[in-house]
Image (cartoon, rainbow, N blue to C red):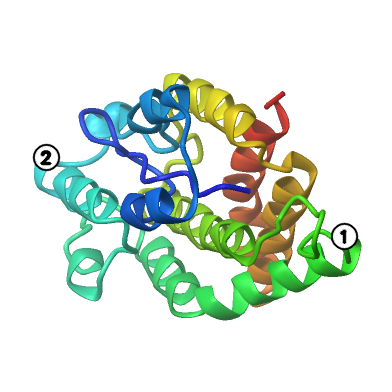
Amino acid sequence: MMPIARMVNSRYAISVQLSTSHLSMTFQLSEKAKELIPKARIVSLTAWENSHSPAEIQLFQAADDAGRYLADEDLQQLHSSEPKSVTTAKFLRDNAADIVSEARAQVLATYPNISEPGGELYPPARAEACWRDFWHFLRCITYGIAGNTVEFTSEEGLHYMNLLYQELGVPLPAMILGLSGIKAASLKRCDADDAAKLAPYFDHLIEKLSQFS
């Protein structure tokens, strides 16, 4: 899979943030891909205005613009969110590397040749882009959890993301499997009650990605 570049919320380019400078040095992007990159989005904060203050929304916006997880100081200012949700978002953030590693292992076990010559994630830069996407998928999910908003995605942005995936030749089955692996690796680290409450956040993005063609 090719790097997707960062997708930004509403006005900015949001979602899966990857280095466009690295991308341009490694791959030759088509003009269509270049046009789609700034339109491709995962997260939308538009509907959050009724549940969060402008200052809180700006915290999410700033983190998303920077392609980073919410920092401790951000989480401490989310007074509209349930404390347990904030704590969970922090926990998943702190365990992101291990969670992504487990999801990656699952993909490689299921598709053992995918990163080998001739595979859909070859050369290595394509595979690394895929693993980085996993990291950013979890990042976007933690935004939804921290904001107590299960439907955290942008329909329009995901439409363009679908077109971008098509243009870049992203192996969708591997991506969906990886996202399911992220869910499993995340929920197994939580107790049963918490896992049941968190599952819809993961399922929401899995469902959206499963609708890609």
Which residue carries the number 1 mark? 111
Which of label 2 and label 1 is nearer to you? Answer: 1
The residue that appears at 46% across and 33% down in the rendered structure is 153
C-alpha gap between disc 2 and disc 1 = 44 Å
Instruction: State which quarter of the image contains the C terminus.
Output: top right
Does 53 sit above or below residue 84?
above
Instruction: Name the residue nearer the viewer: 143 or 167.
Output: 167
Answer yes or no: is residue 190 visible.
no
The residue that appears at 76% across and 73% down in the rendered structure is 105
Q: Is 165 displayed left or right of 17 in the figure? A: right
Answer yes or no: is residue 7 visible.
yes
The kind of secondary structure element at disc 1 is loop
Instruction: Name the residue nearer the viewer: 103 or 149.
Output: 103
Instruction: Name the residue nearer the viewer: 128 or 117.
Output: 117
Instruction: Name the residue nearer the viewer: 178 or 76.
Output: 178
Which residue carries the number 2 mark? 54
Does 160 sit above or below residue 142?
above
In percent of width and height, residue 25 lies at 40, 55
- Numbered-mark total: 2
The residue that appears at 50% across and 40% down in the rendered structure is 150
The kind of secondary structure element at disc 2 is helix
Does 57 sit above or below residue 180?
above
In percent of width and height, residue 14 lies at 34, 40
Identified by mark 1, the residue type is: Tyr
The residue that appears at 67% across and 74% down in the rendered structure is 191
Identified by mark 2, the residue type is: Pro
Q: Which quadrant would residue 211 be assigned to in this image?
A: top right
Q: Earlier in the sequence, mark 2 or mark 1?
A: 2
